[in-house]
């Protein structure tokens, strides 16, 4: 199996001039990429203009202008909104999810950068990189004017959207995004082959009064479009790699030129946290291997590959147990997806069954396919979520007569979620946990590999901070695409 490789300039040139020549493919590193993942986005609909919200940025680090296609997903992985952002060379755009979902304001990037000069802070000229003044100062490949011409009326999403989204549409979006908060929730027991509800083993209990979870992806594309990643046309290579492209499709681009950040803020509580967006680089040698978008490219027939590196499947994070005296505590933020489409085409992970997808009335966490979790304290005491160390799955909860010590259920069934440490196996007040999802080395997966990203939020008194998890398992890279 190939490990983390550094590719020479020749390999990068195959992707286009905007790509980066120094990247460790399959490493979770903050480098320029063709896709950005904002793995956990949260909005408190009940907080008005000062409650919890998420800001997210995208930066084009190359001199070539780029079109970036954003897709907003529910926490059970259904796409509900998309928009396009045009970035000139070295341009940056910051968006607030509250502006979009509560105020109906989509980004308006225009055709100029708005920078007034091209001098550095010491008065010297900026050469070879740096800000641009306006369209007249930009080379053809740098200017968003060239890109704007590719956003003809038939393909327009919102490069210069000057109207608010109507309230009726915003209410519809809210209904989709809060579906996991409103739907009935339970578990599927693998041994008994039945669905059940039990308040004592219920996964994360939330209502419409709680903040709403979602995630966002951003891809470099060829034109402004209204396509989602489950559309086959989305992955037809654009003209840089496919001269005979069809202008009505052919969106796939491979320039590793984007970086981004995520900011979680709550004005009422004076809290703020920040994390880098997850960079998903492209590499030509990933053709034929499992990638980040394999769920959708395989579902579209597997003719084209997105060439995006996959995510790891195991992380370690430190925890501080909740203390009522100083209000300390830990919340684990988990994004996960599988690489294979489910039977029937439902693009959600295998350990969640959504009855009535894509607008489910009930959701069941499957305890057949889950995760293994180990927890240690500062004295090396350890517990695990599985009684059998050879079993790579979360066990089904023990219910009914004869159950002395119920096994912990699957508490992480959604595609993205925030779960406090009290709901996961833990030891003592301080320690660390190691969460492992099925990878391609586990024969029980039937080619269903999990890609994940984990970060952690700490509270202490009136303060909070966020950190990325440490990658401990990365079994998905250089795994050949399964034959469906």
Image (tube, helix red, strand yellow):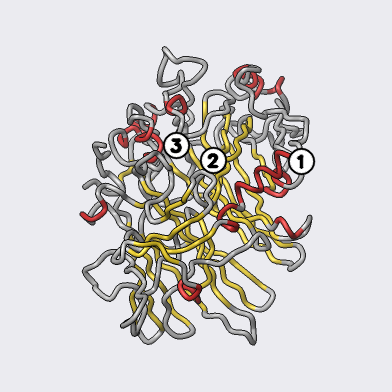
The answer to whether residue 211 is left or right of residue 345 is right
The answer to whether residue 154 is left or right of residue 26 is right
In whole angstroms, how far apart are the C-alphas of marks 1 and 2? 19 Å
Q: Which mark is residue 79?
A: 2
Q: What crowding class fits label 2: few (fewer than 14 Cα within 10 Å), some (14-19), or many (20 or more)?
A: many
Residues 49 and 270: in front is 49
Q: Residue at x 73, y 46 (%)?
A: 99
Q: Which residue is mark 3?
A: 20
Quarter of the figure that contains the C terminus: top left
Q: Which residue is mark 1?
A: 167
Residues 176 and 139: in front is 176
Q: Are marks 3 and 1 in contact (CB under 8 Å)?
A: no
Residue 347: percent from left, percent from top: 43, 43
Residues 50 and 187: in front is 187
Dot 1: element:
helix
Q: Quadrant of residue 134?
A: top right
Q: Residue at x 29, y 39 (%)?
A: 289
């Amino acid at each position: 199996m190939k490990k983390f490789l550094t590719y020479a300039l020749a390999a990068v040139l195959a992707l286009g001039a905007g790509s980066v020549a120094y990247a460790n493919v399959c490493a979770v590193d903050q480098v320029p990429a063709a896709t950005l993942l904002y793995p956990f986005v949260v909005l408190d609909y009940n907080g008005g203009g000062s409650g919890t919200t998420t800001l997210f940025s995208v930066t084009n680090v190359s001199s070539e202008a780029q079109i970036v296609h954003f897709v907003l997903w529910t926490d059970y992985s259904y796409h509900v909104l998309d928009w396009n952002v045009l970035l000139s060379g070295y341009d940056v755009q910051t968006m607030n999810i509250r502006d979009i979902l509560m105020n109906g304001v989509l980004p308006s990037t225009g055709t100029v950068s708005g920078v007034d000069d091209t001098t550095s802070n010491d008065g010297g000229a900026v050469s070879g990189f740096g800000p641009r003044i306006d369209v007249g100062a930009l080379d053809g490949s740098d200017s968003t004017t060239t890109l704007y011409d590719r956003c003809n009326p038939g393909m327009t999403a919102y490069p210069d959207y000057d109207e608010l989204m109507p309230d009726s549409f915003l209410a519809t979006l809210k209904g989709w995004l809060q579906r996991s908060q409103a739907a009935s929730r339970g578990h599927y027991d693998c041994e008994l082959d039945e669905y059940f509800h039990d308040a004592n083993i219920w996964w994360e209990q939330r209502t419409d009064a709680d903040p709403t979870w979602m995630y966002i992806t951003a891809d470099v594309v060829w034109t402004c479009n209204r396509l989602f990643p489950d559309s086959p046309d989305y992955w037809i290579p654009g003209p840089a790699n496919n001269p005979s492209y069809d202008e009505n499709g052919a969106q796939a681009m491979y320039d590793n030129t984007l970086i981004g950040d995520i900011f979680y803020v709550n004005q009422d509580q004076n809290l703020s946290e920040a994390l880098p967006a997850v960079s998903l680089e492209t590499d030509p040698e990933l053709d034929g291997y499992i990638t980040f978008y394999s769920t959708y490219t395989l579902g579209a027939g597997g003719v084209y590959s997105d060439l995006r590196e996959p995510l790891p499947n195991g992380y370690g994070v430190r925890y501080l147990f909740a203390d009522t005296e100083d209000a300390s505590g830990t919340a684990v933020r988990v994004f996960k997806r599988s690489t294979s489409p489910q039977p029937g085409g439902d693009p959600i992970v295998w350990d969640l069954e959504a009855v009535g997808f894509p607008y489910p009335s009930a959701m069941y966490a499957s305890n057949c396919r889950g995760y293994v979790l180990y927890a240690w304290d500062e004295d090396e005491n350890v517990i695990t979520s599985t009684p059998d160390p050879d079993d790579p799955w979360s066990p089904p909860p023990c219910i009914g007569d004869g159950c002395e010590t119920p096994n912990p259920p699957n508490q992480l069934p959604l595609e993205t979620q925030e779960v406090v440490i009290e709901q996961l196996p833990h030891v003592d007040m301080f320690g660390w946990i190691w969460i492992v999802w099925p990878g391609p080395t586990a024969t029980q997966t039937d080619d269903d590999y999990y890609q994940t990203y984990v970060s952690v939020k700490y509270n202490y008194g009136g303060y909070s901070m966020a950190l990325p998890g440490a990658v401990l398992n990365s079994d998905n890279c250089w795994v050949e695409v399964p034959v469906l």
